[in-house]
Image (cartoon, rainbow, N blue to C red):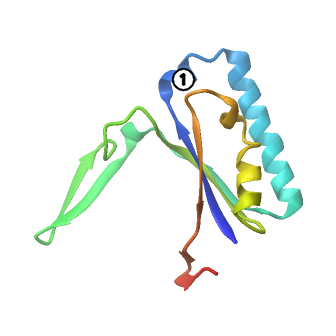
């Protein structure tokens, strides 16, 4: 089963961390990635640019409308994700709990099952 493990970031929380705490988060992600590679559960992981660099695209009356910045005003935003292939939701939650961000008040980890990929419904 495939799961997206989303990492929700709050810039104010990250800004309040010390350099050592930020370094520990980075090192923790490095270890987590290596463990997932060795277990064969990692499909991919990506970090996303700040929402201020985003573009929201919509089509109205056949015209493309592009708005700079995030779609919604929010304190938190999706900062990155892991796409994993594991046995079940319980395992995906177990993996999510090992992400360093999960231990920091004000940051959140979300686990969602993939419904379809490459045009095929996931089982």
Whole-percent x, y for residue 111 in the image: 61, 55
Q: Find residue 55 and report its horizontal and vertical position in percent.
A: 32, 50
Q: Nearer the viewer, residue 91 or 41?
A: 91
Direction from residue 76 to residue 94 in the image, left or right: right
Q: Residue furthest left?
A: 61
- Percent position (x, y) of residue 113? 60, 65
4 horizontally vs 61: left or right: right
Q: Nearer the viewer, residue 115 or 29?
A: 115
Residue lying at 46% horizontally and 38% vertically, measured from the top left: 50
Secondary structure of the residue carrying numbered label 1: helix
Rate crowding at label 1 as few (under 14), some (14 to 19) or many (20 or more) other CA atoms within 10 Å: some
Residue at image point 52% right, 83% down:
119
Q: Nearer the viewer, residue 9 or 112?
A: 112
Residue position for label 1:
13
Picture residue at 84% right of the left edge, 49% below the top: 34
| Vertical side of 39 occupied by 52: above or below | above
Percent x, y for residue 15? 54, 19
Identify the image quadrant of the N terminus.
bottom right
The number of callouts visible is 1
């Amino acid at each position: 089963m495939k799961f997206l493990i989303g990492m929700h970031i709050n810039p104010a929380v990250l800004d309040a961390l010390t350099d050592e705490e930020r370094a520990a988060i980075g090192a923790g992600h490095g270890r987590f990635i290596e463990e997932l590679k060795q277990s064969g559960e990692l499909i991919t992981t990506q970090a996303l640019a700040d929402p201020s660099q985003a573009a929201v695209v919509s089509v109205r009356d056949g015209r493309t409308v592009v708005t700079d910045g995030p779609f919604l005003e929010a304190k938190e935003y999706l900062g990155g994700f892991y796409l994993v292939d594991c046995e079940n939701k319980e395992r995906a939650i177990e993996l999510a709990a090992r992400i360093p961000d999960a231990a920091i008040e004000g940051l959140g980890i979300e686990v969602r099952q993939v419904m379809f990929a490459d045009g095929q419904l996931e089982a």
